[in-house]
Amino acid sequence: MRMQWLVPLALWAVAGCGGAAQSAGHGEPDRPGGGGGPSRCLILTTNDSEANFDGARSADGAGYVGTIARVAAWKQRMAAQHPGGVLLVEGGDVLQGRFMARADGDRAQAMRAAWQVYEQAGYDFGALGNHEFDAGPKPLRFALQGLRRYRLLVANLLAQGTALDPAESGRPLGLFGQTALADCAGIRVGLFGLLTPTSRTISQMGDVKMPAEPLRQPAREAVAQLRQQGAQVVVLLSHLGLEEDVALAADVTGIDVIVGGHSHTRMPREKRVGETLITQTGSRFSNLGELEAVLDGDGQGLDLQRSRWSLRAIDQALPLDAAVQAKVDQLRATLVAELMIGHRKQAWDLTNPRGTYSVLATRALVQSAQAAVQSWPGDQRTPAVTAGLLNAGGFRSHTLYPVGPVTNLDIAAIHPFANRAVVVGLTGQQLIDTLEHGCAPGSDGHGQGLVFFGLSSSCDRSKPVARYRMVEGKPVELIERGQRLVDPRIAGQPIDPNGRYRIATIDYLAKGGSGYFSLTQGDRRCWDGAAFGVEGGRCASPLIAEVIEAAVRSGGLDE
């Protein structure tokens, strides 16, 4: 049975306003508080912002354009015009990126400080994203303790009695909730949140669990509860990705709006599934979503003909809140200092996670592994490290870096995770099984996608997929091999199922991250040759960011 300890309802008093940009194909909408018209609430949204507080560099190169300070100022401007008619919400993945890299290494404090910026900026509600769990549940709980008004919602976690237990002295609603009600321009808006179940394999959830059916049943229960408590419009703050949002909207009735996240999808126009509007803004504070939600004539649900969705660029055309920007500047002073480490002879296009940069980075990892293996005492260096693989989701920043200086912060933005290099010895069949998993559903998204060096293969997605025995959302046994993999090769030669191979990768994949169970069955070694242990001591291997930085300094990342 799903535990219900988070259910006490948050009747959240929200002050705000509304005002939406013109939506393509709709014409200029009526404004909130227009007098005599239907009730309407402006819902301002962001998602997957990854604490990208700086934004792009200013034209003079001396500073930054800024992002969240502009969101704050826009909400304030609208509030002055139409009090009581806005909610500012977000779809998860806040606690990631440059502002997690404090000089003193205190990530928990960085997480707390980042969320406090969102609170100062006027955010009302948010979802938990998978990156909120990057450092595990204990730092996440510490970060939540720093919030007072900004409310996080997630209806599909079983956290009571765990390291993320929301119970907190003096807080009857707990550190976070499942559902909440808010008054927005006289409309009773019910909100709930959902976290992607893939968090169980791509994040560090520790002892925090999810229900056996982690999406449909929690969603139905949340909708029913909110409707019973008087919600006229139900909003899901979703960190599931667009594909899953569409499927959920088709299966669960009563959700009026899905404010999406996780897939980083820029949606200039909303998607409609039945009576549900699905929205998403992209990522990293590139756009502010504006949904003018107009209440239907019967007082339940949206008037889909009059409700409007649009995107507004977060750039220098928006005003800037000086107090929020001052807080961002203060936090920037606590971060690792920026240093030039080399020069880019060709642009790095991180908008394509499997582009040239990613292949060069994987090559640098293989070269570093080859050098490490040569120093292993008593090792015959057979088989040699001939290939490498990294997960596409580990390449971040989604930025085009032009020819010119490379700084340590460029590398940190692209490789923000504390992933260490690992050598894995595999049978040919285990390597084939690994590449087969890269052909699984979702492999073109955040999950199973791989970047290769020294390996090649393709996928026939019409064929059967591999089947695993799963425990709490994680594969623990390969039950039936898949048939999607086509022509797997290493160093240009067909992979021999009975052969032996060594590849370079990172600890995240070596311990089964993103469902790569087959890698956990190999001979996993740290850079000093010691056995890699999932639990306990630190692996004597460099971080992937350190491998890449060394390659940049030596010129080894150039083609």
Image: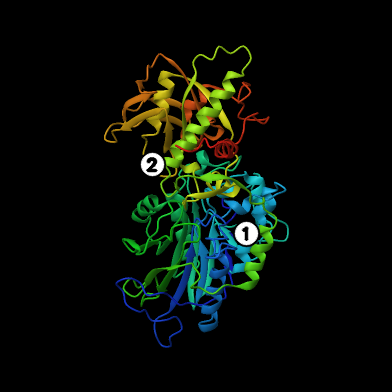
Please provide percent x and percent y for residue 65. Answer: 54, 65
At horizontal 59% and vertical 34% (from top left) the residue drawn is 420
Judge whether residue 159 can be spotted in this image. Answer: no
Residue occupying image coordinates x 50% and y 47%: 396
**Coordinates of residue 132 in the picture (x, y in percent):** 58, 50
Q: Secondary structure at mark 1?
A: helix
Instruction: Please name whichever residue, 329 or 80, is drawn nearer the observer in this view of the structure.
Output: 329
Report the disc number at residue 519.
none
**Three-letter amino acid code at disc 2?**
Gly
Q: Amino acid at mark 1?
A: Trp
N-terminal of the pair, mark 1 or mark 2, is 1
Q: Which mark is residue 442?
A: 2
- Picture quadrant where residue 113 is located: bottom right
Q: Is residue 500 above or below residue 159?
A: above
* Residue 273, position as x, y percentages in the image: 32, 59
Q: How far apart, in angstroms, are the residues tagged by discs 1 and 2?
A: 30 Å
Q: Position of residue 232 (x, y in %)?
A: 44, 70
Q: Nearer the viewer, residue 552 or 103?
A: 552
The single residue placed furthest to the bottom in the displayed view is 35
Q: Residue furthest left?
A: 462
Q: Secondary structure at mark 2?
A: loop
Judged left or right of residue 148, residue 498 is left
> Is 546 drawn above or below residue 232 in the view shown?
above
In the depicted structure, whether residue 134 falls above or below residue 55: above
Image height of 377 relative to 505, above or below: above
Residue denoted by label 1: 115
Classify residue 248 as left or right of residue 58: left
